Amino acid sequence: MRARKLVIAALVLALPAAYAFGKSVAFDRSPPTFELSGRPIGGAQPALPTAAYLTASRIAATADGALVVDADSGSLIKTDKSGKSIAQLPIGRDAGLLTYNPETGMAYVADRGGDRIAVIKVAGKLEVAQSFKTPAEPYGVALTPDKKTLLVTTIADRTMVALDVATGAEKWRSALGREPRGLAVSPDGTRALVSYLLTGTVDQIDLLETHRAEHIAISNAAAPRRCRGCGSAGDAFARASFAVTFMGTDQAIVPFQRETPIQITGGSENTGGYGGGFESPVNHQLAFIGLGKGGNTSQVTAQIAQHQPRAVAWDGIHDALYIAGMGNDTILQIKNASQVGVAEGVTASLTIGAKCGPDGLAVTAEGNVLVWCAFTRSVEKVDFVDAKGALATTAKVHAGPALVATTMNEKQHQGYVLFHSAEPAVSSRGAMACSTCHPDNRTDGLSWRIEKHELQTPILSGRMVGTHPFKWDGGDVDLKTSLTGTMKRLGGFGLDKPQTDALASYIEAMPAVRTPTRDTTQVARGKKLFDAEGCRTCHDGPHYQDNDQHKFTGTLAKSDTPSLRGLAASAPYYHDGSAATLEALLRDRGAVHGMANTAKLSDAQVADLSAFLETL
């Protein structure tokens, strides 16, 4: 048991690992630990408590311990109150989130690779009671208030499905945007919210009638005017929202990061590095969203110091909100969270020996917090409530044992921790991490202004082995060379050789992204078009690339041939991100021309070719 309070002053910036290039950059501003951009939207009284099963999470508190699903091993783990494992059950590697019904003792776990929800009987040893089939790549899972319907969000097929809890039969489905992650249901059962890695929005889905999604843009009001020509009318972009939760029926919380790909200082554009300038182009924030009647919404944002806020939980009894930063191992407490008197509370450090990597939060019946540590695969308990049941003035952290072995080798695991951590070796004062621009090992969907070039952030998953050279101009012969140069440009003092090897090993081991479900006949027609149009001239072999550079119109003298693996998840396209969709690329509507003469294709042919490309 250790008591700590830590006020962190750092920010995470993107590390567009193998492709980006620019000069070294240092940041001289530190974020506040909690600062609202406007008037709080809460009321004079706290909102009514919200049941935990209404929110998808990686960990759930039980009466005698916890349930947690480990993405690394793919195991569902049951612990006692001391954090020790008392039962385990394999679900599937890279498993998604879970929800738990304490009344029936049933847990519902998303098997991301197996396209199913595993229904688990928790009493005694863990047992699979049923398996519910889902569209491709289920991730978020939550129950409705009556516990009769299970809502599931899927990443590859971009769909929400409503399943009957008793039978697993599908009741309805609704289309979602790109890269859905967080899922929460309102206590009155009228709506669900879905957060995203890429869209800059939260979807509000009507659960009673239409089952359609209404897009709520995450407010940009607090962003300073630093960016011009960022690709939209806004200055900055909300990205990497892994979680969402309700505080009562009419207020929700969405942690996210705000990215400014181009910065303007003193009236001039800074182009020396990622976003340019001496302010970090990435801030970590919370959106407080008020959900009124008739579709009316209100919103206020708050800046926080938690790097990569991956997990959030609300204690409705004490009206205390908790946000965990995966990049800097801290938890921020916000007091009076649902009220107009919202204020910063205690900040706790989770690093006890090894880095934790918090990826899930759950509130116990007493109001304390259970933390899933993804790096150590352990549960830590943080006492935010004192012996009298009131919020404490300091937080006490209780470390737990490792519960399951990692599936990575030692080198890959070291790289995994490095990839997600703020390290002085990577960046000036440890202000940056790789995973900010590559959430879930993918992309932030933005084009960054670097040395007067717009360069889009590529996905990494499944694309790094055998696809050299790297960077968009093909300037680095191999991955380790690219990583070493990138650390210098980010102002870090540099990784040593073993660390560079470890980071490269982790990146190279990233699995390929799941492809969406497409009509096989249409895909076959698209494959024939791909061959007939000469696409294999450059995009051939197992990675659909030729390890070479080519001259096209655009801002680069030559452009490296990118792999087409995971193309459905890698928009926008071309080195400058000028083609927002595959259709725009095939219609020759990007800024790069001369690749192929696809503008002559019919609508049906474009659809066929797109279907094939999305399955790569």
Image (cartoon, rainbow, N blue to C red):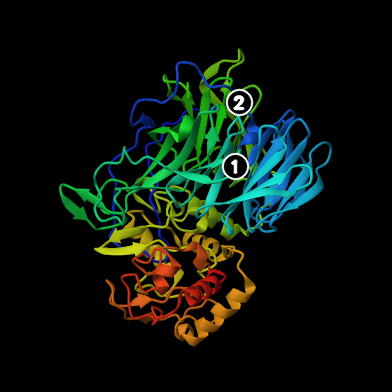
Q: Position of residue 407 (x, y in %)?
A: 66, 57
Against 307, residue 492 (above or below) is below
- Residue at 40 percent across and 56 percent down: it is 15
Side of 594 where 95 appears, left or right? right
Comparing marks 1 and 2, which lies closer to the viewer?
2
Q: Position of residue 66 (x, y in %)?
A: 70, 35
Mark 1: which amino acid? Cys
- Residue at 55 percent across and 42 percent down: it is 205
Look at mark 2 in the image and give the residue it sits on.
368
Q: Quadrant for the C terminus, please.
A: bottom right
Query: Marks 1 and 2, how far apart in space?
Result: 16 Å
Residue 308 visible (yes or no): no
Side of 114 where 192 appears, left or right? left
Q: Quadrant for the N terminus, please.
A: top right
Q: Nearer the viewer, residue 480 or 596?
A: 596
Q: Residues within 10 Å of mark 1 (few under 14, many from 20)?
A: many
Look at mark 1 in the image and give the residue it sits on.
373
Residue at the limit of the structure toward the top, as seen here = 388
**First reached walking from the N terminus: tag 1 or tag 2:** 2
Q: Secondary structure at mark 1?
A: strand
Side of 318 where 165 appears, left or right? right
Residue 72 visible (yes or no): yes
Q: Secondary structure at mark 2?
A: loop
Against 553, residue 231 (above or below) is above
- Residue at 60 percent across and 67 percent down: it is 518
